[in-house]
Amino acid sequence: MSTNGTRGTTGDGGDGAAAQKEPRKGAKEPQPRSVRVVIFSLMIAVLLAMLDNMIVGTAMPTIVGELGGLDHLSWVVTAYTLTTAASTPIWGKLGDMFGRKGTFLTSIVIFVAGSVTSGAAQTMGQLIGFRALQGLGAGGLMVGAMSIMGELVPPRERGKYMGMMAGVMSLAMIGGPLVGGTLTDHLGWRWAFYINVPLGAIALAMVTTVLHLPKKPRQGRIDYLGAALLTIGITAAVLVTSWGGTEYAWKSATIIGLAALAIVSIAVFPFVERRVNEPIMPLSVFRNLNFSLVTGIGFLLGFVMFGAMTFLPLFQQGVQGASATNSGLLLLPVLLPMMFVSVVTGRRTTTTGKYRAYPIIGGALIPIGLFLLAQMDVGTSRVTSGLYMVVLGAGMGFLMQLTMLIAQNSVEIKDMGVASSTATLFRTIGGSFGVALMGTIFATQVEDTMRERLPQGGAGAGGGGAQQSMEGGAQLDADSLAKLPDPVREAYEHAVSAGTHHVFLLAAGIAVLCFIGGWFIKEVPLKTGEAPAPESGAEGAPEAGPGDGTDTAGAQPGQEPADAAPGTADTAETATGDGSGAGSQAASDGTGREPVSDGRASIGA
């Protein structure tokens, strides 16, 4: 039997090897293979959350052709986005209060139910309602996956798994349009939703049978008022960014009223949270400098990332004549470096325990890449633009999952769900604001350029197409552009080039703040043994013997667990890396030796 990962001595000076060969009766630490199976199921859940919009977007023209309701088309996306954003912090808090496994399984069930009903919708109104239900479940998928990983895997080893998560996200963005187009062409648009059913069933089965976390007693009352205020504020803010400049003018009473409602709700929210026992978003987590910094960086990252992903295809199709059929492939120069750097950075973080340099490097590369993209014009080749996109993708790879890791490492395990949901929420809100603001700048610049180049009315033809493309409707693809008169086509290409120039310049300026914020992040050591083992009372877990799986979650360095057994305060049993379930011993703080990893470092290696 391998003894990898079992260094150290027992607290009483006994033979650690003997303890390894004869594990205490009933002890059951997480097995490497089991953990890998759970991580795989979490990746499926993340894939569900990321893949859905990419697939559905490709199927939208066919959906409108069958169900009608073109004037309500934007609500198919908006309803999903609204309920996802609004429910994200609530899912995180429910997991902290009542257990992550149950809330995660519930979110999968709701998402799959929303997928089935969306696929069976007979009218556009029904589809919008069922998409809202689907988004409600999606709000818990990403948060649940990240929170469970945070409880199952110590931060020191979490980097490599988060790198793999980033890879899954990139694959979803690449393959989503291809899968959506294939399903729509050969099986019908309803299968764009039905495809979630087998994937969801696999995730449900794997999580139910393999994942065993401690049951959590009901802790206090749900903060209904705080949840309502946060939901109203988020909903109003998302509607402002979704409707402003498209459905309604920015100066309209509707947009001004929604903006005021968002500001008032969010302003009142902190006062309510200070007065309840179980706040939906504990403000105390923001007292940690690292947590506040990476949350802000996540907001800025979402701002520039979603903006870039929206307007890069517009430039490639409108200026470089690329086909819209395989739109996911147009972003390969961004997504592949992002995936590669995320995986490598995660593994390096796991190996060295060091991470402070990565936000600084990523914060430098992102504005450089965006500034280079801002230099593109009608004469820029695909090779040149592809090289610029590589720089941007590499920069995002340094930050994508590392911000989540630092956020989780900055809080106690009891607030893991809040940390995960807050980081996810701020990135989502940042993306909404980014796309809205950049869309306004893009549309204005396109219209101005078209008027300058075609003062006799050509602006209407070209500008209208650009405006439609910005709103997610039909756009001028390569075939359509080829049919335009030469002066109109050239004017449109220069207009799109000017619009993307201003958009990427704005994004580059915003991204500089990421670089500045990265310098203030402190290198707080990543915890190596906070992940709890199954305890007595855990669903599906056996009774643990004395001293097995002592939960040291939230303990500060050098602090003893409150419930440590007498005579064992200077040791901590952990799982072996070879899957035997035998305990190894971590050196105590009083020995003068560095603490030994809990053995999970070999999981998935």
Image: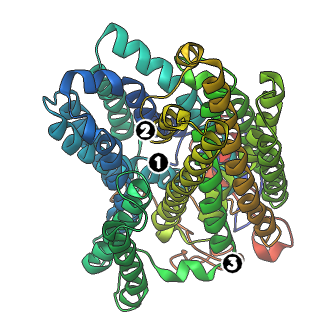
**Horizontal and vertical percent position of residue 59:** 36, 24
What residue did someone put label 1 on? 145
Would residue 539 be seen by someone viewing this image from the given angle?
Answer: no
**Going 18% across and 34% down the picture, which residue do you hit?**
117
Local SS, label 2: helix
Q: Earlier in the sequence, mark 1 or mark 3?
A: 1
Q: Quadrant of the N terminus?
A: top right
The answer to whether residue 264 is above or below residue 438 is: below
**Going 81% across and 48% down the picture, which residue do you hit?**
371
**Mark on residue 29?**
none
The answer to whether residue 419 is above or below residue 83 is: below
Using a 10 Å C-alpha cutoff, classify the residue at mark 2 as few (fewer than 14 neighbours), some (14 to 19) or many (20 or more): many
Q: Earlier in the sequence, mark 1 or mark 2?
A: 2
What residue did someone put label 2 on? 45
Q: Quadrant of the C terminus?
A: top right
The answer to whether residue 277 is above or below residue 570 is: below
Local SS, label 1: helix
Which of the two residues, 457 or 521, is positioned nearer the viewer here?
A: 457
Which of the two residues, 426 or 542, is positioned nearer the viewer here?
A: 426
**Horizontal and vertical percent position of residue 29:** 52, 49
What residue did someone put label 3 on? 289
Q: Measure the C-alpha gap from mark 2 to mark 3.
A: 31 Å
Q: Quadrant of residue 118?
A: top left
**Horizontal and vertical percent position of residue 261:** 34, 76
